[in-house]
Image (cartoon, rainbow, N blue to C red):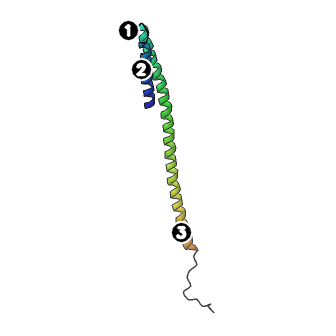
Amino acid sequence: MKNLTFIGVLLLGLAFLLYYMLPQFSFVKLFEPLNLMGILAGIGIGLIIGGIVGYVSKGSALREEQKRKELKQLRKEKEELEKQAAELAKQQALQNTPPENKNPQNYY
């Protein structure tokens, strides 16, 4: 958005420079109705275009932020699932181990 403001100021300065270079330039003519209408129309068009660009850029930024939040949530869920899987594997390993035979009688 700062770049758009800079470009707008640059173009406005260029317009004043071109208007100043006219042979019949006078500061009073700048505020005549026809010139004033042109200036106001230019400002209005600039505000409309700036509003559209701002709306589009804000929408894309919001979508990117939403994607980042979803990715973070998925990572958190993945870590929780991995912890649960590790706990289940640990419990199954403990249940599947054969009991120790303290009194073996079949040794040769």
In the rendered structure, the answer to whether residue 19 lies left or right of residue 103 reads left
The amino acid sitting under disc 2 is Gly
Instruction: Please tell me in which quadrant of the rendered image residue 88 appears.
Output: bottom right
Which of labels 3 and 2 is toward the front? 2
| The C terminus: image quadrant | bottom right
User: Does label 1 or label 2 sit earlier along the sequence?
Assistant: 2
Q: Are marks 3 and 2 in contact (CB under 8 Å)?
A: no
Q: Nearer the viewer, residue 73 or 34?
A: 34
Q: Nearer the viewer, residue 81 or 18?
A: 18
| The N terminus: image quadrant | top left
Circle 2 sits on which residue? 13
Residue 18 tag number: none
User: Does label 1 or label 3 sit earlier along the sequence?
Assistant: 1
Circle 1 sits on which residue? 26
Q: Residue at x 48, y 38 (%)?
A: 62
Up-down relation of residue 84 to residue 5 (above or below): below
Q: Residue at x 52, y 65 (%)?
A: 87
Q: Are marks 1 and 2 in contact (CB under 8 Å)?
A: no
| Gap in angstroms between the C-alphas marked 3 and 2 | 73 Å
The amino acid sitting under disc 3 is Lys
Q: Residue at x 44, y 17 (%)?
A: 15
Secondary element under disc 1, as helix, strand or loop, is: loop
